[in-house]
Amino acid sequence: MRRYGKHTDEDDIRSRPNRKGNRPRTNIRPKHEDAAEGMVLTVDRGRLTCLVDGRTVLAMKARELGRKAAVVGDRVALVGDLSGRKDTLARIVRIAERTSVLRRTADDDDPYERVVVANADQLAIVTALADPEPRPRLIDRCLVAAYDGGLDPLLMLTKSDLAPPDKLLELYGDLDIPYVVTSRAELADGAAADRVREQLAGKVTAFVGHSGVGKTTLVNALVPEDLRRTTGHVNAVTGRGRHTTTSALALPLGDVTGWVVDTPGVRSFGLAHIDPSRVIHAFPDLEPGTAGCPRACSHDEPDCALDAWVTEGHADPARLYSLRRLLATRERRDGD
């Protein structure tokens, strides 16, 4: 048996060749200190369009990021060809920590959450007052997702020429949610655009709503003409709209600073990923009253301390009702 001393000749030692012909893996990751900062505008089949220094750059995710995926709104660091020229490809090497995340699951039984948008300041919940009929349970689910993800909710009520908004606004009045009401005529002649921009100026706003409510039409009224997207119509038989937006896309506001993120229309908004105990954080007037709640209190049971908190006059009973309605939304289907 051949033995080697302390000072062997490395050329004399046989090593097993790498069958793939590539370099062996290492745990040492490059720092990429010269990487440029950018924002993800859209994602399409593994290719990410990013805004870097005022120009759009096509990029792919670096292998070293592993399973970590970038989504629309993410702040990323890129290396490689950042010219934005045709047939060039950059590489995303870092994803910055997110300030907010809008997530959803396909339904309440689906364990896999999907990140829709990152780093948005607010969530515009677009709902038609008619054609199709409003679905308050879907609105409730979007509100829960907004509160859980750190986004401020904003109600966008469209098609007010077909039905009045009073009944729906009364349902959410105790939540003090800002809202904008528009009609089809106002969107067509641009009269509603300025009112909407006031709520969006200086912010990143994600738009969500089921198909046919006028979400993309509203977005098109806010962004430059060359960036407008295709719109569809509501099916007269089913009362549902067609999916014309197939991927989320961040677009700059036309006349003021800020971004809108148009997302595909949803038929359901699952909340399987959300811990109901976090929803209370969106009710600062009720949260102190939970100090006397039993452990793991659902805030909708006989021993819940919130009942006494409200009875003593610390908060409006309507606010407690609103909280419990939102918490119960996981137990109900969207169409209920």
Image (cartoon, rainbow, N blue to C red):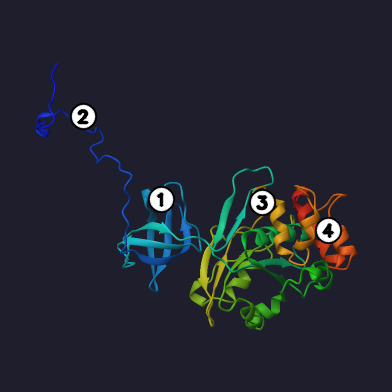
How far is disc 3 from disc 1 in space, using C-alphas? Answer: 25 Å
Q: Amino acid at mark 1?
A: Leu
Residue 104, relative to residue 183: is it above or below?
above
Q: Nearer the viewer, mark 3 or mark 4?
A: 4
Tell which circle, 2 or 1, labels the residue nearer the N-terminal end: 2
Q: Residue at x 58, y 76 (%)?
A: 222
Which residue position is annotated with label 2? 16
Q: Amino acid at mark 4?
A: Leu
* Residue 272 picture location, percent across and down: 67, 47
Question: What secondary structure is marked by label 2?
Answer: loop
Circle on res. 306: 4
- Mark 2 is surrounded, within 10 Å at the Cα level, by few (under 14), some (14 to 19) or many (20 or more) other residues, namely few
Q: Amino acid at mark 2?
A: Arg
Which residue position is annotated with label 3? 274
How far is disc 4 from disc 2 in space, using C-alphas? Answer: 69 Å
Residue 3, relative to residue 323: is it above or below?
above
Q: Amino acid at mark 3?
A: Ile
Say if mark 3 contacts mark 4, CB within 8 Å: no
Which residue position is annotated with label 1? 65
Residue 114, relative to residue 79: is it above or below?
above
Q: Is residue 133 visible?
A: no
Which sits in the foreground, 280 or 136? Answer: 280
